[in-house]
Image (cartoon, coloured by chain):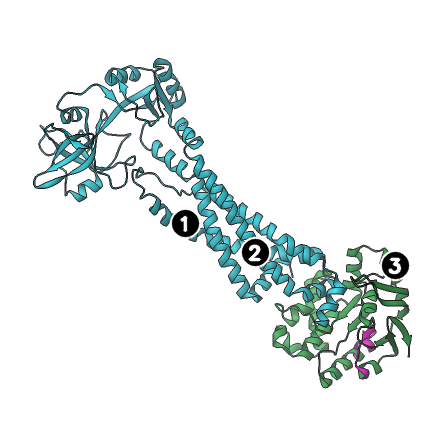
Amino acid sequence: MTIVEAHALTRVFPMSAGPVSAVRDASLRVDRGDYVAIGGPSGCGKSTLLHLLGCVDTPTTGTVRFEGRDAGALTDSERGRIRLTRIGFVFQRFFLLPMLTAWENIELPQAEAGAPAAARRERTRALLEYVELSARADHLPSQLSGGEMQRVAVARALANRPALLLADEPTGELDEETGEHIAALFDRVHADGTAIVLVTHNAALAQRAKTRLVMRSGVLVTT
Amino acid sequence: MTAFALAWRTARRYRARAVLAVAGVAVIGALNFDMLLLSRGLMLSFADLVNSTGYDIRISGGSGGPLSRQPIDNATPTMKEIGALPEIAAVAFMRTATAAAIRPTRPPEGLELIGSSDPAGLGIWKQVAGSTLDGAGGDVSLPPAVISRPMAERLNLTIGSTLGVRVRLAGELSAMPAVSLRVTGVADFPFESQNAFVVATTMEGFARAHGGVLNDQAEFMFARSRPSAGPDAAAAAIAKLRPDLRAFSNEQLVANFAKNAFAYFRQISVVLSTTTAAFSFLLVATLLTVSVNQRLGEVAALRALGIARRKIAATLLWESALLVGLGGLFALPLGQLLAMVLDRILRRMPGLPAGLHFFVFEPQSLVLHAAVLAATAVVAAIYPMWLAVKLPIAQTLRQETVS
């Protein structure tokens, strides 16, 4: 079953010095159970493509269909609802809310999606166990290491049982050993049935993906 | 987690910023609250003053303002004539003269001598010790006198003391002999200045202080309406009976003053309270805007995760409301304290009636204070909210990652 299908995507950013084409004629299909890694040099358009797939941005031309729905035809709040319930995001810089504990950061998207309190508690407890951070549930992000913060971010991304997990340089801020732990965590997420698309410079992480793609100057190339 | 809870946790997380904002709003809010107290303070205080006299109508001469002290001729028959009106329950009149307290071996002390036809002095003083001009004590052959508290304290006068008073003419002691008065009571004179030396006596004592020869004039008359008629109808009846006089009910007098004399304070307070509200707005808007700019990545990530714009906007609005609300709460005791200090300073102005206050609390001030702060909180949150909800998510995430 296809989760997201991008067809002939281009994304042009108007700049004062002239328009910049970040993505050119990119097409990609992600099905249930896929694990896709996109590599390429900095500034080649990887993150932009990820944002287009995740309904965070809209293409200049081309279409993105998420679970059969044309993302370009949806309202902003409909795209927001898809991001909340069907897509999980993991960012390079974690972006956990600093005033909330690990538990609360994971609970927040569930509350926003309207999950009942008992279900939220159960899901949050399970996710903290999943990322092996049950003992740090009440810790603030400032009291966690980089690797722990990224594990909380992964748990938060999985909070609403998304069909697709998108990760933008998830090991970019971590040392090699910690990055390896996160990569192992992604393996487990994938094995548990969540499709993953990640953008990374980390060759070891990319090697774990079933499909490896490379972007060069906005063009998607299969390796 | 609700928007309010998120706002509360944010305020707690960025404690220094929150404390700074609350302290700033408290100080500015205190000034704003004081301006609101000032805007109607004099009018309310004046209304309290005139309503506490026991008379509800003031009568003055035909020309000049209601307190212009235009003398009323033939005061005694006029008083009787007005007192005979069916709308009137009681009438009294008073007049004043500049005088001096004469004491052996001591220089004369200037004072205001009041002659009152009402021995209880209802429209003029409030008894604090002893009795009214009806009271006994001391040499009963002497005219009675009720004196002001500062005078009793400074000249060591007690009930039963004898006081020599000599009327002054144009600021100089006259050639008239001093008259002796016996002190029957000590009182506060709310229409006189705070530390003034005031002596009130009967019209007979007043005439005796003038050598026994005095024309029958009054500076003011006070009248009390019958409950069945009411002050406005009674004032109208007096005006009809004596078109050459001006009769005002207390309400009319206060309205007249509010329209003319106190409008100045209202205008000043409106300008200053608007200015202070603008300062509150600038402070909170700046802090929130800086805060949002510091958290752009966080906000963009929240929106990428699907957290609704509405919730992010509501969180910022609550944050603004919390900062302004807490500041506004602290502003109340601070403003009250500041109002007391300022009132004390302003009331030192010479010639100001002791019973008059500049800063007077009324529930309406509290409601207005809350309304101004609520509006400030909303307006201050508008730009940061706009920043947060209009944030281009992808571009911001990219910039935050690169930076």
Q: Residues within 10 Å of mark 2 (few under 14, many from 20)?
A: many
**Disc sitting over residue A70 in the figure:** 3
User: Which residue lies under the disc numbered 2?
Assistant: B284
Q: CA distance from mark 2 to mark 1?
A: 23 Å
Does the stretch in magenta take in A202? yes
Between residue B246 and residue B109, name the one nearer to us.
B109
Between residue B216 and residue B134, name the one nearer to us.
B216
Chain A color in figure? green
Q: Is residue A3 visible?
A: no
**Disc sitting over residue B336 in the figure:** 1
Residue B111 in the image, given as x and y percentages of width and height: 20, 35
Q: Is residue B393 visible?
A: yes
Residue B293 in the image, given as x and y percentages of width and height: 65, 63
Does the stretch in magenta take in B174? no
Q: Residue at x 65, y 68 (%)?
A: A97
Q: Find numbered disc 1 in the image and state the secondary structure of the residue it sits on.
A: helix
Chain identity of mark 3: A
Chain identity of mark 2: B
Residue stretch rendered in magenta on the structure: A188-203
Kindly identify the amino acid type of the residue bearing the numbered disc 2: Val
